[in-house]
Amino acid sequence: MVQFLPLLSILSLASAVLLSQRQKAAAQVVKLTSTENLAVRSNGQILATNMQSPNLYTVDPVAKTSSTAIVLTGASGLSGIGEVLPDVFAVIGGKGIYRVDFTGTTPKETLVKEITEASNLNGLAVLNNNTVLVADAGRGDVYRFDVTTGAYSVALSDPTMTPSGSIPFGIDGIKYRDGVVWYTNIFKNSFHKVPVDATGKATGAVTTLWTNLMGDDLCFGPNGKIYVATNGKNSVIEVDPAVGKPTTVATVTGSTSCGFGRGSADKDVIYIGASQGIFQTTISM
Ligand SMILES: *[C@@H]1O[C@H](CO)[C@@H](O)[C@H](O)[C@H]1NC(C)=O
């Protein structure tokens, strides 16, 4: 989610300044207000969303430029994004799930369907080439959503996903890999995983990795590690899934999301969405 608490931000900024004496700051790629989420295309461009805009932005990390790739009709703001097929993306716009196709000469957008009963859709994970998992931060559950037909139903619901605090946000970041769903709960400061079957239904218990560090969205590194944007904690952290303890990689103010480069020149580069734009830093492989 976007950076939300001014007081927390000021306190965090102070700690970020202290931290930066020890931790490297990620470098700004482009300035882009309140980046909410991002996805890296196979051609190296980064697609970025903003919860206050229907524009899907495209960022060239080499030229360090940004522009609007396409406007999603009927949306007032965009959040989670993921690639379902080569250069075809599912994007959350309000209660709607859009399909954005970059395979032609100009990008095409289609509203697949609205999840009418949704409260606050935020994170999105790709389960397979036709299904996404959509996290409802307001209701504290996860829908499986067919990006062709728009058929959807609740796949996951757990107390670790429920909202808490004055802003009704619970489950926030979500990603899927190799039979496991990884997710954060932003105001519970927690990070979890749950094994799932091919339909996204849990096949085992939820494991909680921590309950003392804010997490927004996350991404998988090429080195098998998981990276989590910590939003109000102004950083990106790395976690070895086998160990489960976070270590800070870089400081970034209001970090919301991340994704890795897909080219030979940037495969060890993590791109980070944040309140002041898109940032990057190199990770150790
Ligand atoms: C999607 O995945 C299924 C199952 O792995 C596969 O059979 C199918 O060919 C894939 N479709 C496309 C368009 O890649």
Image (cartoon, helix red, strand yellow):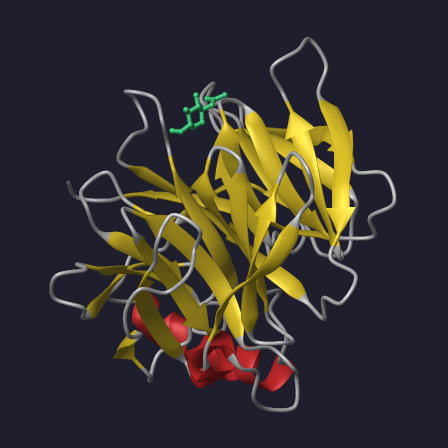
Residue in the picture at 36% in, 27% down: 262
Counting labels gives 0
Choose between 140 and 73: the one closer to the eye.
Answer: 140
Across and down, in percent, residue 76 comes to 83, 52
Quadrant of residue 65 within the rendered picture: top right
- The image quadrant where one finds the C terminus is top left
Residue 167 drawn above or below residue 229: below
Q: Does residue 131 appear to the left or right of 21 in the view shown?
A: right
Choose between 15 and 157: the one closer to the eye.
Answer: 157
Residue 228 drawn above or below residue 32: below
Across and down, in percent, residue 67 comes to 70, 29
Furthest-top residue in this view: 105
Furthest-right residue in this view: 74
Residue in the picture at 60% in, 49% down: 145
Furthest-bottom residue in this view: 165
Q: Does residue 33 appear to the left or right of 10 in the view shown?
A: right
Residue in the picture at 28% in, 77% down: 208
Furthest-left residue in this view: 243
Quadrant of residue 3 within the rendered picture: bottom right
Quadrant of residue 52 within the rendered picture: bottom right
- The image quadrant where one finds the N terminus is bottom right
Q: Which quarter is ligand 1 in? A: top left
